[in-house]
Amino acid sequence: MLRIALTKGRIEEKAVEYLSKSGYDTSELDKDKRGRKLLFKVGSEIEVVLAKAADVITYVERGVCDGGVVGEDTIMEAGANVYELLDLEFGKCRFALAGIKGKNFYEGSGHKIIASKYPEVTKKYFNEKGLDVEVVKIEGSVELGPLLGLSDAIVDIVETGSTLKANGLEVYEDVAQISARFIANVSRIKTKKNEFDKLIAALSETVKKERQNS
């Protein structure tokens, strides 16, 4: 049996939908039937754990779960030692560099400060560009960084861009595309190869059908 961790919320809901469309019995995961259960059976072959995104990474990396479904943003920030087996192609958004509308971020040679909930992603991005910046971690509304003069720009997840626009900010450039990924523990992918192959094949077919229908 495979034990799979799903990220709670929208990713969980879509992952359950995809499992169901792939032929698995997801009735135990019906929100009206869950009660206080923490572990759920999906047919006779899969056990599901619901967890916060960062915990999905921890459970899979530590091997207490064989695999999991989590956003690429969480994987990138954690620098996790896991295998990415499949891009599920839902939960699509992007990391973007953004700031005050009309401002040229790269103008001048002064010290640049970036506010972000994702300091590791931000540092890696600017290191690859050969730019030395100071990264300030913000837990709340990161858009306040440039508005309050704390930072020159932000790196954050952008879906529609409506929050940026409402606050006089704009995207300067994209950093990375993000979507939900199916990940696996680096050793379990070998010891449970047949189980993973069966599940990934079924999910891949569902992803393909969803893409064709979109």
Image (cartoon, rainbow, N blue to C red):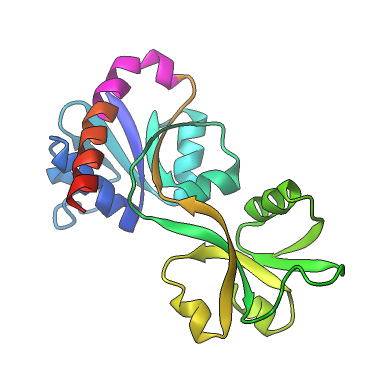
In the displayed structure image, the side of residue 151 where residue 35 appears, left or right: left
Give the vertical position of 133 relative to 81 (above or below): below
Q: Main secondary structure of the magenta part?
A: helix
Say if the magenta span includes residue 96: no
- Closer to the camera, 9 or 177? 177
Q: Is residue 80 left or right of residue 105?
A: left
Quarter occupied by the N terminus: top left
- Residue 37 position (above or below residue 132): above
- The answer to whether residue 140 is seen in the rendering is no
How many labels were placed on the picture? 0
Image location of residue 67, percent across then percent down: 39, 32
Query: Residue 50, how many percent across, how many down?
Result: 34, 47
Residue sitting at 29 percent across and 21 percent down?
197
Task: Residue at 18% x, 42% y: name it.
Answer: 209
Where in the figure is residue 13, as x and y percent of width and height?
26, 53
- Magenta span: 188-199
In this image, 127 relative to 73: left or right? right
